[in-house]
Image (cartoon, rainbow, N blue to C red):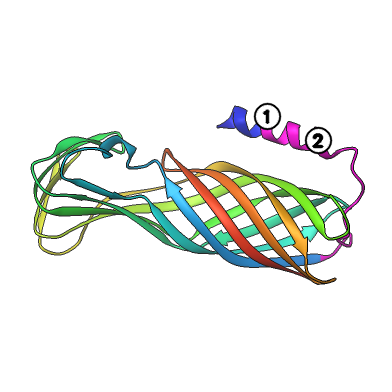
Amino acid sequence: MKNKLNTTIAALFLATASMTATATEVGGTYVTTGMVKLSTTEFDSVKGTSGVTVDDEDTALNFVVGYQIDNNLSVEAGLIAESEMSVTFAGGESGTLNGKSYSVSGIVTATLISDTSKMLGVKYASPVNESFDVYGKAGMLFWDVEGVSSAAGTLTYDGATYTESESATYYTNDGSDPYYGIGASYKVNSATSINVDYIKMEIDDGDVDGLNLAVAFDF
């Protein structure tokens, strides 16, 4: 991931260094708010297993505040709201999930809940014309996740057994990892833009892709 991040940043600066300055005012502040569609590889190890149903996509709110340092570079801080993805076992399955062994008796749903994640990074933008900009971004994502099992059945995970007809937390973790992405912005008027970007992240050793649609307001 680190090598990918470094390569992306280097390519971004080389590709945009010769372009002219953006229309965003130096020293200005902007906010973006929108929705990001998330998908993860977290449950790939059990995909295709008979009796297993995987839901590895969700949509979450995304909010970013940015400050323009110079004509092209800005710093950003943002939030990605809580999201949930899950896998349902019909019973009798066993294998590895999140790098740990599991076995299931009965019908059990394991839900991975990602609490609100925090983002801190930089964005480098360059104009294509007066209305259209392209940009790249990179930074650190600070995440916090928990795994919750529910339904009538028994889940044995990493040597511990959970038997319930209600919900039980079987896994928690937190950490930070780099993110990087590319995007484009269309200026509707002098203070409002529509942004579309693709972000690559890592959460709990699982790759997460995000496709974001947002509205940006300059101040």
Label 1 sits on residue: 7
- Report the label total: 2
Hey, what amino acid is under mark 1?
A: Thr
Give the quarter of the image for residue 28.
Answer: bottom right
Q: Residue at x 60, y 46 (%)?
A: 140
Hey, what amino acid is under mark 2?
A: Ala
Q: Is residue 151 above or below residue 179?
A: below
Count residues near mark 1 (Cα–Cα under 10 Å), then give few for <14, some for 14-19, many for 20+: few
Label 2 sits on residue: 15
Position of 101 with respect to 34 (left or right) is left
Helix, strand, or loop for circle 2? Answer: helix
Q: Start and end of the magenta stretch?
A: 7-28
Q: Where residue 97 sits in the image (x, y, percent)?
A: 27, 38
Q: Residue at x 39, y 41 (%)?
A: 41
Q: Judge by depth and name the residue closer to the eye, 191 or 116.
A: 191
In the image, residue 10 lies in the stretch drawn in magenta = yes
